[in-house]
Image: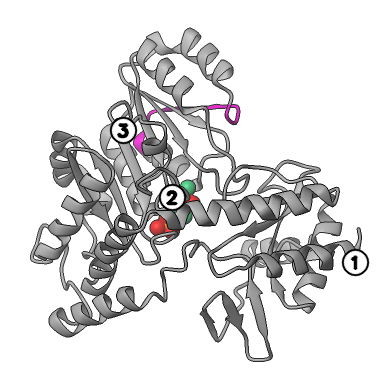
């Protein structure tokens, strides 16, 4: 057997082979496969904007006006002025001087970090940060130091012993962690950044649209936009569309336009996605209470799980139900699926040993009675 075959066989034997599972459609909080329909507890369309009539209408309008493609990278001839409108809106939304649109969150993170940092610098990254942040740090050639999850004491001790060795230092954290649904002590991180002369980047992928009085994210909620150098986030989650952004100073944006390889060497977002992104920000700004309603619904779900004796983590619309044993977790997910609930089991190595879990995404497609029926179902199954 060749190397590839051995790898695949080993993965399959261990029950760890990842496979693609086509679905026929996903709409209105439901997933349809050929055979049947499921309630969707795995979607990042937290605010139910992906099917919103105004989102669809603006995408369609752009499609009619500009066709299906931007047809070139931004620096060649793909630089539609609606993309500049989106960037102005984004900068305003995130309360920063300027913004730059990227084709995806993955491309944003690998491109931003590797353009701004290099060999003599260091990247201090929370241990649970997204793979794209890790890849960006590796690509930069800077020294990567990972600090314990949401542990400012650990970060401080690393800075104490290592900061002086490096020219520039970047601290990077998510503002809502995608597997744990929790948030960092951002004010403490800001104090450390200032004390040790670092720069700070946050990834608001799961916070944008949901937290803060204006719905812009956790940086807004904590009043820290002036203190965070690089605010990155995506349009593909709560904003119901596709693409990503960085909000930062004008100089940084200009520098990235000149140096960021994932920005320069890639075709611009399709016009329909740009138009939908603009509409998503407008919808949030017109009615920022969507996020509040979502968080109240998630708090309700946490409450009924906790009062039924289950262990839940986090403080957001991401609700991880910790089962512990990986096999039990897989079995529970399978039974829930048989009963019409589409929920993702997460197990080591994605999470630490003994912390296998079901990760529920609460969205505005859900209603309190659906959440209650789901909890009753879990109680009935027992584990
Ligand atoms: C989803 C996600 C990304 C990647 O964004 P895409 O637009 O899907 O490429 C980056 N960071 C975090 C924390 C994410 O959850």
Distance, label 1 to label 3, CA atoms, is 46 Å
**Would you identify the image quadrant in which residue 65 lies?**
bottom left
Q: Check the picture and name the quadrant holding the N terminus.
A: bottom right
- Report whether 345 appears left or right of 184: right
- Report whether 125 appears left or right of 263: right
The answer to whether residue 361 is above or below residue 31 is: above
Q: Residue at x 52, y 78 (%)?
A: 28
| Nearest to viewer (mark 2 / mark 3) | 3
Image coordinates of residue 172 in percent, x first then y, are 43, 32
SS for tag 2? loop
Callout 2: CB less than 8 Å from ligand 1? yes
Image coordinates of residue 220 in percent, x first then y, are 36, 38
Badge 1: how crowded within 10 Å, few (<14), some, or many (20+)?
few
Q: Is residue 143 magenta?
A: yes
SS for tag 3? loop
The answer to whether residue 79 is visible is no
Badge 3: how crowded within 10 Å, few (<14), some, or many (20+)?
some
**Would you identify the image quadrant in which residue 140 lies?**
top left
Rendered image: mark on residue 205: 2
Q: Residue at x 46, y 63 (%)?
A: 47
Rendered image: mark on residue 225: 3
User: Which residue is outermost to the bottom?
Assistant: 35
Badge 2: how crowded within 10 Å, few (<14), some, or many (20+)?
many
Distance, label 1 to label 2, CA atoms, is 35 Å
- Report whether 217 appears left or right of 76: right
Image coordinates of residue 9 in percent, x first then y, are 73, 66
Residue receiving disc 1:
380
Disc nearer the start of the sequence (1/2): 2
Coloring applied to the structure: one colour
- Residue range corresponding to the magenta coloring: 140-150
């Amino acid at each position: 057997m060749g190397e590839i075959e051995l790898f695949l066989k080993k993965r399959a034997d261990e029950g760890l082979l990842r496979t693609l599972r086509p679905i026929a459609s996903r709409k209105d909080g439901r997933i349809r496969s050929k055979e049947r329909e499921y309630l969707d507890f795995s979607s990042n369309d937290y605010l139910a904007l992906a099917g919103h009539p105004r989102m669809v209408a603006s995408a369609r309008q752009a499609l009619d006006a500009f066709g299906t493609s931007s047809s070139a990278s931004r620096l060649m001839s793909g630089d539609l002025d609606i993309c500049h409108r989106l960037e102005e809106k984004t900068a305003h939304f995130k309360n920063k001087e300027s913004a730059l649109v990227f084709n995806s969150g993955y491309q944003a993170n690998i491109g931003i970090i590797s353009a701004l940092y290099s060999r003599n610098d260091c990247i201090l990254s929370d241990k649970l940060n997204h793979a794209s942040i890790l890849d960006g740090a590796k690509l930069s050639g800077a020294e990567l130091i990972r600090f314990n999850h949401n542990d400012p004491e650990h970060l401080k001790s690393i800075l104490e012993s290592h900061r002086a060795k490096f020219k520039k230092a970047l601290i990077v954290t998510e503002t809502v962690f995608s597997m744990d649904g929790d948030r960092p002590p951002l004010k403490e991180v800001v104090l450390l950044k200032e004390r040790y002369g670092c720069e700070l980047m946050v990834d608001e992928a799961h916070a944008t649209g949901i937290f803060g009085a204006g719905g812009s994210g956790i940086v807004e909620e904590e009043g820290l936009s002036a203190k965070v150098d690089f605010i990155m986030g995506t349009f593909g989650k709560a904003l119901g569309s596709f693409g990503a952004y960085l909000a930062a100073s004008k100089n940084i944006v200009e520098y990235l336009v000149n140096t960021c390889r994932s920005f320069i060497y890639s075709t611009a977002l399709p016009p329909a996605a740009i138009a939908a992104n603009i509409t998503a920000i407008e919808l949030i700004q017109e009615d920022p209470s969507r996020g509040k309603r979502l968080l109240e619904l998630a708090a309700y779900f946490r409450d009924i799980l906790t009062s039924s004796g289950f262990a839940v983590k986090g403080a957001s619309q991401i609700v991880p139900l910790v089962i512990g044993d990986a096999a039990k977790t897989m079995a529970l997910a399978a039974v829930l699926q048989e009963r019409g609930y589409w929920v993702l089991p997460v197990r080591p190595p994605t999470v630490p040993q003994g912390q296998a879990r079901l990760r529920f995404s609460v969205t505005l497609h859900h209603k309190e009675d659906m959440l209650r029926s789901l909890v009753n179902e879990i109680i009935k199954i027992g584990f």
